[in-house]
């Protein structure tokens, strides 16, 4: 434990160095950490993919959901501190030499620190997108592939810097998030896994979701039985965050589990889509944009004054309904074949 404490102490100095060197780029780093927030990705960028390709959306959704579930489970098991409260709790520093790290509204996340959810989810998301782009640009040769990989790793680098700059993560938590994200990407993009899940009946897929929920509940209650408060990270964040209003309930592990379960249940009901008709982009994109706007509004007006159960249940239903809509309603209403058949019927009726 002494070695571990010493290593974290050195990483605190790394964070202070990053905050000093990149202080003039704070606005840019804030934009990066906001853009690659798992919730923002899930509510903006990923739905846009649903307007471009239902098949790609299904693949991306499966990868991101399983990755976020893995991140939540590993966070709960490792139960590591975040820098902004560790520096105040540790005995590695005395009251005389304890440094102060900069924090703002982006710092105060009430969940364990390892692995970084930003890095793990972004690694998977970008891995899927860039894999598709590599296939599409294969005719342009090695230059295009190398360029894409430079952009990929550069993006992960700046996300890591942003997470360290705001005191959200230690360096090793960022690196571990990237490594786990790459592993999950390769597992989730395996055609065998996707085909296996697609071949299962709807009841079996729903049973798989129920099994994951049981694992989450087991982890929660095992901690309780061991005398560990599952919400310890929330209390640490409240204790050491400079402004309690910075804290958001949507960044807790419990809410993440609710959000993920609602979306994963929708995917289980529909099943991974391996073959899908092309979309009429002129219709599907506006449709998806309207649905995204409505989803943001619905989530903002989720009832918060009727207790935690009502709030969580409402959030669960919203994530289920909108994920189901992206998977089912968008291809049903904006499928290219569907639109063509309608135009054919119209032309035939006019000719008659």
Image (cartoon, rainbow, N blue to C red):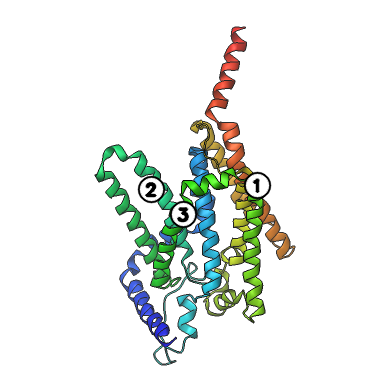
User: Which residue position is annotated with label 3?
Assistant: 187
Q: Which residue appears at 32% of the width and 49% of the height?
A: 148
Q: Kindly state the secondary structure of the residue where label 3 is placed.
A: helix
Q: Which residue appears at 52% of the width and 41% of the height?
A: 50
**Mark 3 or mark 1, which is nearer the start of the sequence?**
3
**Mark 1 or mark 2, which is nearer the start of the sequence?**
2
Tell me the CA gap for discs 2 and 3.
16 Å
Residue 237 lies, in percent from the top left, at: 55, 75
Identify the residue at the far right of this view: 306
Residue 186 lies left or right of residue 346; in this view the side is left
Q: Quadrant of the N terminus?
A: bottom left
**Mark 3 or mark 2, which is nearer the start of the sequence?**
2
- Give the crowd class for mark 1: few <14, some 14-19, many >=20 residues within 10 Å: some
Question: Mark 1, mark 3: which one is toward the viewer?
Answer: 3
Q: Kindly state the secondary structure of the residue where label 1 is placed.
A: helix
Residue 349 lies left or right of residue 52; in this view the side is right
Q: Which mark is residue 130?
A: 2
Residue 219 lies, in percent from the top left, at: 62, 70
Residue 225 lies, in percent from the top left, at: 67, 78
Tell me the CA gap for discs 2 and 1.
28 Å
Viewer can see residue 111: no
């Amino acid at each position: 434990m002494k070695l571990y404490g010493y290593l974290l102490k050195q990483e605190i100095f790394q964070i202070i160095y990053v905050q000093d060197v990149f202080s003039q780029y704070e606005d840019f780093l804030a934009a990066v950490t906001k853009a690659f927030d798992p919730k923002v990705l899930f509510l903006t960028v990923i739905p846009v993919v649903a307007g471009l390709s239902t098949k790609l959306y299904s693949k991306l959704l499966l990868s991101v959901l399983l990755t976020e579930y893995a991140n939540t489970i590993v966070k709960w098991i490792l139960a590591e501190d975040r820098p902004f409260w560790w520096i105040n709790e540790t005995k590695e520093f005395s009251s005389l030499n304890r440094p102060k790290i900069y924090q703002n509204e982006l710092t105060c996340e009430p969940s364990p620190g390892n692995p970084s959810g930003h890095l793990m989810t972004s690694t998977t998301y970008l891995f899927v997108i860039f894999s598709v782009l590599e296939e599409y640009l294969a005719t342009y040769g090695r230059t295009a592939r190398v360029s894409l990989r430079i952009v990929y790793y550069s993006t992960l680098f700046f996300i890591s810097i942003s997470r360290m700059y705001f005191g959200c993560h230690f360096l090793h938590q960022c690196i571990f998030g990237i490594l786990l994200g790459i592993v999950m990407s390769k597992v989730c993009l395996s055609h065998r896994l996707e085909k296996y899940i697609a071949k299962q009946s709807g009841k079996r897929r729903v049973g798989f979701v129920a099994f994951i929920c049981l694992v989450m509940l087991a982890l929660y209650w095992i901690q309780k039985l061991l005398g560990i408060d599952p919400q310890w990270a929330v209390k640490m964040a409240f204790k050491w965050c400079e402004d309690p209003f910075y804290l958001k309930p949507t960044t807790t592990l419990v809410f993440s589990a609710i959000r993920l379960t609602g979306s994963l249940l929708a995917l289980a009901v529909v099943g991974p889509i391996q073959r899908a008709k092309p979309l009429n982009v002129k219709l599907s994109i506006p449709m998806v944009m309207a649905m995204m706007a409505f989803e943001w509004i619905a989530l903002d007006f989720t009832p918060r004054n009727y207790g935690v159960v009502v709030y969580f249940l409402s959030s669960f239903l919203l994530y289920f309904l909108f994920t189901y809509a992206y998977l089912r309603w968008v291809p049903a209403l904006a499928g290219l074949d569907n639109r063509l058949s309608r135009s054919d019927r119209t032309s035939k009726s006019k000719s008659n």
